[in-house]
Image (cartoon, rainbow, N blue to C red):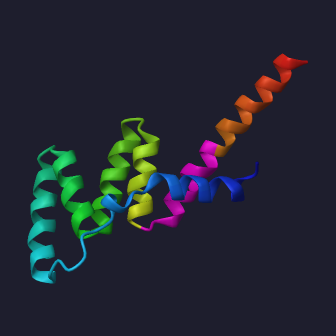
Amino acid sequence: MDKTQVVPILADGLIKSADLPTPGVESDRKVKLNRKGNELFNGGDVEAARRIFQTTGYSDGLIRVGDRYLSERRPIEALKMYKLARDDKRSERLIADAALVIQYFLSETKEEEK
């Protein structure tokens, strides 16, 4: 399986409809929520901030949460945040890394079978 086959599998199975931004949130309400999310994030409550950023679809906040997850060695959760933020550069980098890991384990399995 090459990288082009891995990308749709990860993208389709990673994001649930409940993870998508809530439609119809007015822009002034989004601004207030995003400010609150930023306060929570800066105060260390990353999970509460994530919920707000997911609700509003605030891509910068989602990317910061993804970066935090990545620094905590939580690449699957980071990938989800990057996909929700529509950050293809970061998403593709993580997917490529995952593909390399899978290739490594598959090659080890084949070596053991010989």
Left of 20 or right of it: where is 99? Answer: right
Left of 114 or right of it: where is 90? Answer: left
Return the residue nearer the eye: 10 or 61.
Answer: 10
- At 61% across and 59% down in the image, what residue appears? 8
Left of 111 or right of it: where is 69? Answer: left
Q: Main secondary structure of the magenta part?
A: helix
Classify residue 109 by image quadrant.
Answer: top right
- At 44% across and 68% down in the image, what residue appears? 86
Q: How many marks?
A: 0
- At 35% across and 59% down in the image, what residue appears? 63
Q: Which residues are magenta?
A: 86-98
Q: In the rendered view, would you say 31 is above or below 70?
A: below
Q: Position of residue 72 (x, y in %)?
A: 36, 36
Return the residue nearer the eye: 51 or 87.
Answer: 51
Is residue 60 one of those drawn in magenta? no
- At 25% across and 76% down in the image, what residue appears? 23
Q: Position of residue 2 (x, y in %)?
A: 75, 52
Is residue 88 one of those drawn in magenta? yes
Locate the C terminus and report the quarter of the image it occupies. Answer: top right
Left of 94 or right of it: where is 112? Answer: right
In the rendered image, the residue lying farthest to the right is 114
